[in-house]
Amino acid sequence: MNIKNINFASKLLILVLFSQSLLAGKINFIPNDERILLSNEIFEKLTQEHYIQASDEDFNYKYIEHLIGELDDNKRYFTKYEVNRFLNSAKIFNSSKQTFDVSSAYKIINLYFNRLVEYSNYQIYLLEKETFSFSGKDFLDIYSDDNDWQPSKLALKRLWKQITKNDVLTSELADKEDDDSIENIKKRYTNRIRRINQRKDEDIFSLAMNSLTSQFDPHSTYFSPRSAEDFELNMSLKLEGIGALLTTEDDYAEIVSLVPGGPAEKSGQIDPEDKITRIKQEDSEEFIDVIGWRVDEVVDLIRGKSGSSLDIEFIPSNSEDNSNRKVVNLIREEIKLEDRAAKSKVHSVKIMDQEYKIGIIDLPTFYIDFEAYRNRDPNYKSSSNDVKKILKDFNKNSVDAVIIDLRGNSGGSLLEANKLTGLFTSSGATVQVKQNSGKIGSWGDYYAKQAWKKPLAVLVDRGSASASEIFAGAIQDYQRGLVVGHRTFGKGTVQALDTLTSGQIKITESKFYRVTGESTQNKGVTPDIELPSSWDIETSGESSLYLSLPWDTIPPVRYRTFDIDEDILAAVKKSHLNRLNESPNMKYILNLRERYDLVKNKKELSLNIDNRKKEKAERKDWIFDIENTRRENVGLTRFETYSDMEDFNKEKDEKDLDIDMDSDYLLQETANIIADYIYLNDKILITKLGQ
């Protein structure tokens, strides 16, 4: 036998063994009669109880199309032929028993997981047989929006090879002490296969059903029996963990939101969209790589005994390269009501020869001790009661204006949103609610007494949602104060939890409307004065979600307004715009945004190690330079090295300040805005008295 034949035989043997490893434990779930009946029950509840209460004629096509896109958003696992085959089948689906094809959904999900196993096995094969060169001109396409599906399995494998090469390069560039990166990556791929093979029929059904519920809106959700249990635990806040909601994004467990008062939020070092890469328990010397893990398994690893600690390694949300890492040490604790309570501080702002006291109230959520409230305890703890006490103290200490900081406040009790509004507007309607039946009712605190009569500003951002939007919208509609910040999230829907034959379902059943008749849904609340953002807020929020319900209007209710002088508001805006061009802190935020816009639509990632090292060094130099420029312009000492800056930031984060005026440039600017408002009002009053 000649050498050529021997080589061919060796390659054939490898291919046969490789194919056999793929066939072992192949996923092939089929929905049984019980699952089909449950899926029909879910669909029937959605069509009867959802706010929309309707399904399109091409519902099944849209359902299958969305499921494919949801599973393979980056077009890495399905071929063009496979996608077209499923879509063509969806078009001609016709059944007297179902409006949607759950059997096809199962086939797509089966193929997806089997393809993931094939992909992972191929990656392991590459790590064992391939020696990657990082000196060429090749790149990885990281912008899939304008890509078509790959034409063949061979094309998929070429893409998989580039992804594997990038994984190895990223690991070599990561800032961590790890000499055996190849073995760790191989272990990650192996763990991914193991976890895929642990999938149960319940997992497949949940994926199929949540793609179904998302055809109605993004907040309607099916909970399997286990998911329902986890949901109830999260709602009761009795879990001892870090206080963060996680989801899966590609191979990573990603932070969705932080629970106010929880360890993650209080650390000041963790942000939404941070990706978890590794976790280390306090009694362990080694990190566990959790890339590719199921999100519920990552959650199980994070949960633990109250008072115990863990280290979590993240890829920061603002990172331009997955090789950038940060490690945060957290102490697990049960999140109590008092941890989420309103905090306050008085800050002084000087304009000309006038000094104004600005009272700041940080409200992370609209909370209430329902048990004490139901038991008619006169001292029950709630956001409105706590804010009322703070306002009383502010009045006593001659505070000139108040800022209610609702940034990151994702909502809470509607009752509390109404009561809090009443502290500033007195009695009256706060919000309207339209039910799925078409019935409209108004909500408010009709016995409220105004506790604060001086100027007010409400500071919001893209994370301000639901009850926060009700409060901010009411303050704006009543012209009781200025709304400052970024456009809010836009969640103007209400969900109800219902029990199923197996599991539970959360269904959107009504919508919120402002007293003007405008919905808060989708559009959110637009501030009177918009502050600069370091990122594009349109990439998140309700308007960015698949099939979010549209903005609309209903008739307004009767309400009286306070008086905000339009000329004064125009002058306040002009003063703010002047500071945008002059303030070093505002310029710093604008510089961050300029950088964000430069890299947000980056389409290619170099697989040349020298280019990547150069890009990484350039990013560090840029961050270092703009921070030193800012410090110099505000009269602070420049940092000598990048490490000095990192140490300073770490020390600052560890101080755990409730309200940090020194580092919170948007809060500083809001204080300047409301101080301008007082100053200009005083000037007009003095002018009128002199006439």
Image (cartoon, helix red, strand yellow):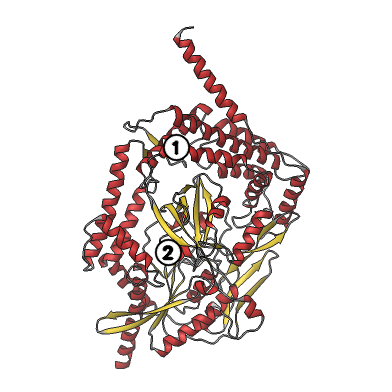
Residue receiving disc 2:
267
Residue 383 seen: yes
Residue 522 place in picture, x, y as percent: 53, 60
Residue 416 place in picture, x, y as percent: 57, 76
The residue located at (59%, 40%) in the rendering is: 196
Residue receiving disc 1:
183
Residue at far bottom of view? 690
Q: How many marks?
A: 2
Q: What element carries label 1?
A: helix
Quarter assignment of residue 393: bottom left
Residue 460 place in picture, x, y as percent: 45, 68
Residue 424 seen: no
Which quadrant, please, contains the C terminus?
A: bottom left
Left or right: 121 with respect to 134? right
Q: Which of marks 2 and 1 is nearer the N terminus?
A: 1
Quarter assignment of residue 553: bottom right
Could you give the CA–CA distance between mark 2 and mark 1, rounded to whole angstroms? 32 Å
Residue 19's disc number: none
Dot 1 alpha-carbon crowd within 10 angstroms: few under 14, some 14 to 19, many 20 or more? few
Q: Is mark 2 on a helix, strand or loop?
A: helix
Which residue type does callout 2 highlight? Ser
Residue 433 place in picture, x, y as percent: 63, 70
- In this rendered view, identify the residue nearer to me: 656 or 621: 656
Which residue type does callout 1 highlight? Glu
Dot 2 alpha-carbon crowd within 10 angstroms: few under 14, some 14 to 19, many 20 or more? many
